[in-house]
Amino acid sequence: MDRKLKIGVIGAGGIAAHAHMPGYAKMDNVEIVAICDIKLEKAKKLAEEYNVAQVYEDYMDVINLPGLDAIDICTPNYLHSIIAVAALERGLHVFCEKPDAVSVAEAEKMKAAAEKSGKVLMVMRNNRYMPISSFLKDYIEDGRMGEIYAARCGWQRRRGIPGKGGWFTTKEQSGGGPLIDLGVHMIDLTMWLMGNPKPVAVTGCTYNKFADTDVSDSVNSTFGEKNSEGIFDVEDLAMGFIRFENGACLQIEFSWASNVEKEQRFFELRGTKAGASWTSATQKLGIYEEEYGKTVDYLPNIDNTKGVQIHEANLRHFADVVLNGAEPMFVPQQGVNMVKILEAIYKSAETGREVLL
């Protein structure tokens, strides 16, 4: 029998229950040996659902389990780096939910711990695994888009504030609002398609305009645990502009709440040979080229809703890297670069000036 990757899951909240555990349940090369949560009843409930024998309240009890290969971190953001570093120092591989960390210093600690231990550190980048993403990546790497010199991306919600008053809206625990919550997804996907250029400068603005509303029109507002007596000291809208070392640029927009037409994720790439765009509103990928003296539009016949669920696909890749030595699609330096961008946008918004990276 092929060896199974023995994983302990730390954090039994929504992302573990709705994405990670269902994904692992479909993988025959992974065994979940323990689940941990500071709210023990949540861990017990999830463990019972997936027939996991060991349940803990303290994450160090999981990290110190004999025979464990890896941990999967599904906790609030501020704990990502703390738990990851402890696990890497124990000689465990680490998979972590996004964002990588709440500060550049913490992201660099994770990277250094991974390099010292020689273990795999991977952070969720599930949007790279959409069918349209892999198709477009191949199209770009074949040279058909030419030089990608400009791009846009974003995630707009009308009224979709998660866990209002809980850790999501408490900066000390989350690191920020929709920029750090949603921005990681679409900035990463767009930069990955662009070839992961090195960011050199950012400009940004952030706003908090909807802290006093309880109106919701999005399933995303059901995420997290609300607290009517809690804190809302993060932004509900962030906009920004990123410049890269190769001269390319990226315009970004992320909101939990805005007066816009509809909720959607989107990206747009502009190359010298072709352009491309996608929005979650239609799930259609468009490609725009010159052919036979005309500008033409293509809609590749790709069903972006079919195939392996994208969180599961990312987890499968992690297992393949650890067990079989597959080439990782994500390396820790990409995480450091991401957090540098996010941190600098917040600084730019605070100072009103461009921030050099």
Image: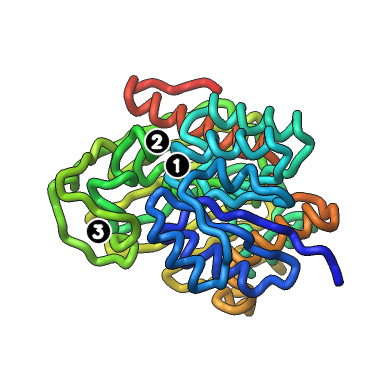
Q: Dot 1 lies on which element?
A: helix
The Cα–Cα distance between marks 3 and 2, rounded to whole angstroms, is 21 Å
Q: Quadrant of the C terminus?
A: top right
Q: Amino acid at mark 2?
A: Gly
Task: Report x, y in % for residue 14.
Answer: 42, 61
Tell me if 151 is positioned left or right of 29 in this view.
Answer: left
Q: Quadrant of the N terminus?
A: bottom right
Seen in the picture, residue 267 relative to 210 is either above or below; the reply is below
Q: Residue 175 got which mark?
A: 2
Q: Residue 176 got which mark?
A: none
CB contact under 8 Å: marks 2 and 1: yes
Crowd tier of the residue under label 2, counting other residues whose Cα lies within 10 Å: few below 14, some 14–19, many 20 or above:
many
Per the image, the residue denoted by label 3 is 159
If you read the primary sequence from the N terminus, does the residue marked by circle 2 or circle 1 appear first?
A: 1
Seen in the picture, residue 185 relative to 333 is either above or below; the reply is below
Q: Identify which residue, 274 or 325, lies in the foreground.
A: 325
Task: Report x, y in % for residue 260.
Answer: 27, 58
Seen in the picture, residue 116 relative to 291 is either above or below; the reply is above
Per the image, the residue denoted by label 1 is 77
Tell which tag, 3 or 1, sits nearer the viewer. 1
Residue at the spot 42% in from the left edge and 58% down from the top edge: 13
Q: Dot 2 lies on which element?
A: loop
CB contact under 8 Å: marks 3 and 1: no
Residue at the spot 49% in from the left edge and 49% down from the top edge: 152
The Cα–Cα distance between marks 2 and 1, rounded to whole angstroms, is 7 Å
Tell me if 145 is positioned left or right of 38 in this view.
Answer: right
Tell me if 259 is positioned left or right of 100 in this view.
Answer: left
If you read the primary sequence from the N terminus, does the residue marked by circle 3 or circle 1 appear first?
A: 1
Tell me if 217 is positioned left or right of 324 in this view.
Answer: left
